Amino acid sequence: MIRYCYLLLFLAACGTPASTDEDDVRRQAEGIIAADNRADLDGVMRYYAENAILIPPGAPDIQGHVAIRAHYQKIFESSVPRLTITIDEISVSGTQAVCRGGTGGEVLIKGDSTVKIVNDKFLMVLEKTDDWRITHLIWNR
């Protein structure tokens, strides 16, 4: 009985393995796509650092929370994203991380019910303060 109690105490002390920074970065990348698919504006904004920069293909940079929020608000008002994410690489060095991958799926345009196919590549730069936040998001088609 005593050995059994020691075993239970040992297992309780071990708990579940701590998540790694790579796991946390992966959750951030997957989480922002899930928030996109829900058209959750506040949820999306929680993934970005205050001074974040979006670098879209063929368009001017979008910098800072106010501009990024306005950008997403337009997207959610005019379309319904149905996106998936593939993560090809995550690299973490101290409080900086880079996540590279692709987004796929489709976007339904509300005005005329057309569907845009999405097949993009992305590079996401994140910084860890209290949690991982996106500082730069670059993508192309």
Image (spheres, rainbow, N blue to C red):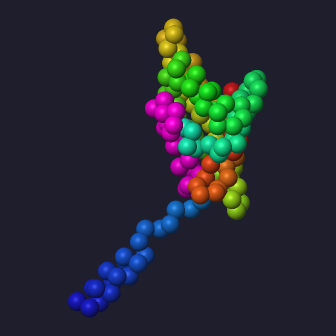
Q: Is residue 18 visible?
A: yes
- Identity of the residue furthest to the top in this view: 112
Whether residue 132 is in magenta: the answer is no
Prevalent SS, magenta region: helix
- The reply, left or right, for residue 58 in relation to residue 82 is right
- Whether the magenta-drawn stretch holds residue 31 is answered as yes
Q: Is residue 137 left or right of residue 87?
A: right
For image coordinates 28% across by 85% down, the residue present is 5
Residue found at the very far left of the displayed protein: 1
Q: Nearer the viewer, residue 59 or 16?
A: 59
Query: Residue 24, located in which quarter of the rendered image?
Result: bottom right
Say above or below: 99 vs 64: below
Point out the image quarter for the C terminus: top right
- In the image, 4 versus 25, the foreground residue is 25
Query: Does residue 134 appear anywhere in the picture?
Result: no
Q: Quadrant of the N terminus?
A: bottom left
Which residue is pictured at 63% across the width and 27% down the height? 71
Q: Could you tell me how many numbered marks the image carries?
A: 0
Instruction: Give the answer, above or below, for where 68 lies relative to 18.
Output: above
Point out residue 20 in the picture as x, y percentages from the top left corner. 56, 62
User: In screen coordinates, is 84 left or right of 123?
Assistant: left
Q: Residue 6, image x and y in percent?
A: 33, 87
Residue at 49% in and 11% down: 113
Which residue occupies 57% across, 39% down?
Answer: 45
Front residue (pair 41, 12): 41
> Residue 15 appears at what percent x and percent y?
41, 72
Q: Give residue 109's position: percent from left, percent from top.
A: 53, 15
Q: Is residue 36 left or right of residue 141?
A: left
Extreme-front residue of the structure: 66
Range of magenta residues = 23-43
